Amino acid sequence: MESLPVKGKAFFKGKSMKIIFAGTPEFALPVLERLAESRHEIAAVITQPDKPSGRGQKVQEGPVKIFARERGISVLQPEKLKKPPFVEVLKPYNPDLIIVIAYGKILPKDMLELPRYGCINIHASLLPRYRGAAPINRAIINEEKITGVTLMKMAETLDTGEILMSEQVEILDDDDVQSLGNMISVLGASLLMQLLDKIEATGELKGAPQDESLASYASKLTPEDCILDWTKTTHQISCKVRGLCPKPVAMTRLGEKTLKILRADIYFTEENEFSVLLNQKDSEPGSVVKLLKGTGPVVRTGDGFLIILKAQPPGKNIMSGADLVNGGYIKLSDRFQSTPP
């Protein structure tokens, strides 16, 4: 890489910086695509090892690996980063930066110190809020109206490094994890391009420390987190369904079977009908109180009603609410339970 000093700054010719990219899922693709389209050189891509997926548990390549392989970019898939030290594999690449987004492993100190400018993480929240593994899920589940994306200089402890750039994103009423994630990832890619220009202009990577008093954590979701509690408010349940869609997906029990719910909207009705549904016999949270032809079943919540618009019965494909009713999978007076499947 050739560089010429101009008025105390660095002027880079050709491929400006040599970058190693670390990421795994579809969420990381917009950033990788922008880098591939830029004048910067992607020296290698680090991604998680291939894993079994789907009903047949066939080993499948991740989206980042597929993209890199199709474009002839070197792909590295270490099982471990510390022992043996994976940094020895990376040293010959002599990177200026390592850029990380949804990679799935914590980088050890020797990797953080390898690149000329350090390592940048693109995190899907306004740090220091929602540090951790599931910031998009938790923000939607917690009924937040605003979240964002933060570019951070990585440190040894999780999501605690200096903030380099950030921008907020509005959470819309119909956003789920995929739609909000797409928006955040595209915005993160745009901010990254601006940051790379700034690094070129200044020859350094500096940010501002995080305010620890504002820190919160978005811990990894557990199977228990996915169970719907029908005694909660309609809005809380709706947010939980959206915050778990498309993965790991909200679940409820119907008898001995487990139903996965992917979309459910608030059922707005006139005051008279609301009162009738609320006070009819056996109208308790989780009860199916009405079947809307062509739409889906209406379920009682802690303070109102929810329409199930998309769900997956065990062993079946995802169905619309109307098909659930027409196929007899959900019947009037059925009652969903909030206990673990």
Image (cartoon, rainbow, N blue to C red):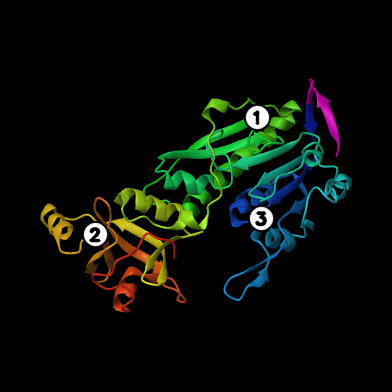
Seen at 54% across and 47% down, the residue is 134
Percent coordinates x, y for residue 75 in the rendering: 77, 57
Residue type indicated by callout 2 = Glu
Q: Which residue is mark 3?
A: 24
Q: Residue furthest left?
A: 272
Residue at 63% over, 31% down: 164
Residue 242 spot, x, y in % from top left:
42, 54
Please identify the quadrant where the C terminus is shown.
bottom left
Q: Nearer the viewer, residue 53 or 171?
A: 53
Residue 329 among magenta residues: no
Q: Residues within 10 Å of mark 1 (few under 14, many from 20)?
A: many
Observer-nearest of 191 and 49: 49
**Mark identifier at residue 284:** 2
Q: Which residues are magenta?
A: 1-9
The residue wearing badge 1 is 162
Q: CA distance from mark 2 to mark 1?
A: 50 Å
Q: Amino acid at mark 3?
A: Thr
Q: Position of residue 327 (x, y in %)?
A: 32, 79
In this picture, is 146 found above or below 68?
A: above
Other-residue count near label 2 (Cα within 10 Å), few / some / many at <14 / 14–19 / ≥20: some
Above or below, 308 relative to 170: below
